[in-house]
Image (spheres, rainbow, N blue to C red):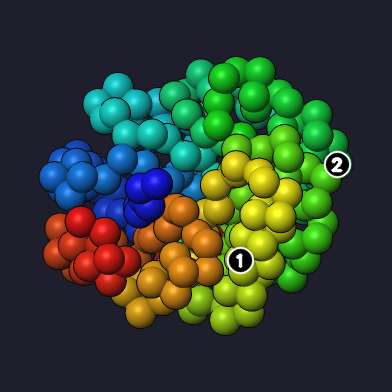
Amino acid sequence: MKKNIAPSLLAANFFDLSSQMKLLKEGNIEILHLDVMDGMFVPSISFGMPVISSLRKSVDFFFDVHMMVENPERYIEDFYKSGANGITIHFESCKHIDRTISQIKSFGLRSGISINPATPVSFLQNIMSEVDMVLIMSVNPGFGGQKFIPYSIDKIKELSKMRAERNQKFLIQVDGGVDVNNIKSLSDAGVDEFVAGSSVFKGDILNNIKALNDALGEA
Ligand code: DX5
Ligand code: ZN
């Protein structure tokens, strides 16, 4: 199965999104990761529906919306209408995870559940059969450009083992501090999708994508 790099818009220059989207397309990117922050679940505030729906009119990437939002069930329909293709909610942000995952799936969207660095993988043992994707945060969510937390790799290995033992099909995504130095070991640990903010948008975007793909060993 093809492994994908999902650039995180958070690290882009918001003054000129159009030319950066063209470069992502040229670099054969298929997934755009969209970090929505509410200033409550995480300390910072990013962007929301107007930015996503404006982008939707002009680009055809898979829109992977990462909701760092308290009580995300309030906004699932709004993000669906803004053009999301997948929505990931945080285990720590929502009281009724099972219901909210069903809500995401009821719109035909890819459903994702994410855990913070300090949340154990074992907390996902019941919900993992219901989701299309599990996101392991490898930094504390809220900001781009942070350092990868090394124990995240053990969590990914543990999750990957659980997936194999239970013969389940969900994708594993990692987000935070992904770069050319750790992408291969993350892939070997079982990651299918690599969210990358700074390591795509800082500097030369096309060169950065190529370097990440080279390190990953993908064409
Ligand atoms: C952090 C966000 C990430 C962030 C990653 O809360 O969820 O998606 O943009 O940025 P880098 O790749 O710079 O760590
Ligand atoms: Zn993210």
**Residue sitting nearer the eye, 189 or 83:** 189
Around disc 1, counting alpha carbons within 10 Å, would you say few (fewer than 14), some (14 to 19), or many (20 or more)? many
Is 184 positioned to the left or the right of 158 in the image? left
Number of labels in the image equals 2
Is 45 positioned to the left or the right of 95 in the image? left
Residue 180 screen position, x and y as percent: 32, 74
Disc number for residue 156: 1
**Mark 1 CB lies closer than 8 A to ligand 2:** no
Say if mark 1 contacts mark 2, CB within 8 Å. Answer: no
Callout 2: SS: loop
Q: Quadrant of the C terminus?
A: bottom left
Identify the residue shown where x is 60% and y is 42%. Answer: 169
Disc number for residue 95: 2
- Whether residue 92 is visible to the viewer of this picture, yes or no, is yes
Residue 137 screen position, x and y as percent: 59, 62
Q: CA distance from mark 1 to mark 2?
A: 24 Å
Identify the residue shown where x is 57% and y is 78%. Answer: 149
Determine whether 133 is above or below 195 in the image. above
**Mark 2 CB lies closer than 8 A to ligand 1:** no
Determine whether 83 is above or below 153 in the image. above
Residue 134 screen position, x and y as percent: 62, 49
Callout 1: SS: helix
Is 123 positioned to the left or the right of 33 in the image? right
Tag in front: 1 or 2: 1
N-term mark: 1 or 2: 2
Identify the residue shown where x is 29% and y is 28%. Answer: 60
Residue 126 screen position, x and y as percent: 83, 45
**Residue sitting nearer the eye, 164 or 85:** 164
Given the image, on which type of amino acid does mark 1 rest? Answer: Ile
Around disc 2, counting alpha carbons within 10 Å, would you say few (fewer than 14), some (14 to 19), or many (20 or more)? few
Identify the residue shown where x is 60% and y is 38%. Answer: 132
Given the image, on which type of amino acid does mark 2 rest? Answer: Lys
